[in-house]
Amino acid sequence: MNALVVATVVLSAMSAMSVADAKSIPRTIIQTSKETTVDRPDWLAYQTSLKAANPNFELIHYSDAEARAFIAEHYAGTILADAYDIVTPIMRADIFRLAAIYKLGGFYMDMDMLGKASLDPIVAAMDEDEYQAVFPKEWWMSTGYYTSIYPGRTPEDDEDHWQMGQYAFGVSVLLQCFTVIIIVCPIVCGLLLLVIVMM
């Protein structure tokens, strides 16, 4: 399947969804792991810290089975649902976190995220239209490394050196640019990888 066709199908599926409530970020933290019950002591400690730092937030955990049911319910008949069934488990986890936040809004946090401070100031800034999405700066790339990844380009400014992280982020509900940036890219990359592997 052509990458442009995949992108077009996904964008068509997403654009059909309502964006009426896209302004405010919900006070929700979404997490996912393989099993329904979180029983690892370190993960329980991290969840406790997130709840303590954010007592007015709802923490929602999805197991792999619950994530699959979420995709089936909210993305039935889309290329995203088809891709979900053919990619690796790690790719499924990546697709789910992006699809869940796109649909529900709020924050996604990996299971090993420690809550050190309240997310309320970020929510307040987003509610005032200062931001519609927030992502961590994961690591800074030297100019040499940057040009090795993006041949023919050089960083435009210091911010361009930073790699964006996806282990924790927040998004307003149904943010349309989020669809293009992070829903389409993993699907296209995953499908292209499968095509290459199958050749």
Image (spheres, rainbow, N blue to C red):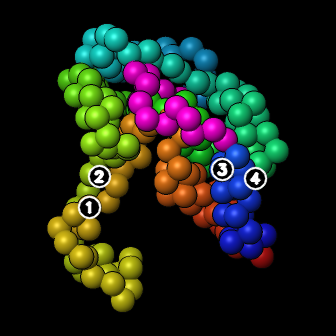
State the image quarter where residue 197 is shown.
bottom right
Task: Say what amino acid the circle numbered 4 marks.
Answer: Ile
Please report whichever mark, 4 or 1, sits nearer to the chain's N-terminal start. Answer: 4
Which is more toward the observer, 168 or 41? 168
Residue that carries the numbered disc 4 in the rendered image: 79
Query: Residue 174's spot in the image, x, y percent?
Result: 54, 40
Asked if marks 1 and 2 touch (Cβ < 8 Å), the reply is yes
Please report whichever mark, 4 or 3, sits nearer to the chain's N-terminal start. Answer: 3
Question: What residue occupies the far left of the structure in this picture?
Answer: 158
Residue that carries the numbered disc 2 in the rendered image: 138
Residue that carries the numbered disc 1 in the rendered image: 162
Residue 84 against residue 26 in the figure, above or below: below
Q: Label 3 vs label 2: CA separation?
A: 30 Å
Please report whichever mark, 1 or 2, sits nearer to the chain's N-terminal start. Answer: 2
Question: What residue occupies the far right of the structure in this picture?
Answer: 77
Please report whichever mark, 4 or 2, sits nearer to the chain's N-terminal start. Answer: 4
Q: Label 3 vs label 1: CA separation?
A: 30 Å
Q: Is residue 196 left or right of residue 167?
A: right
Does the image show residue 80?
no
Task: Say what amino acid the circle numbered 3 marks.
Answer: Ser
Residue at point 19%, 72% (across, down): 157
Query: Residue 122's spot in the image, x, y percent?
Result: 26, 32
Q: Is residue 97 left or right of residue 147?
A: right
Q: Which secondary structure, mark 1?
A: strand
Q: Label 1 vs label 2: CA separation?
A: 7 Å
Query: Residue 98's spot in the image, x, y percent?
Result: 54, 43
Magenta part of the chain = 17-32
Please report whichever mark, 3 or 1, sits nearer to the chain's N-terminal start. Answer: 3
Residue 1 against residue 46 in the figure, above or below: below
Label drawn at residue 105: none
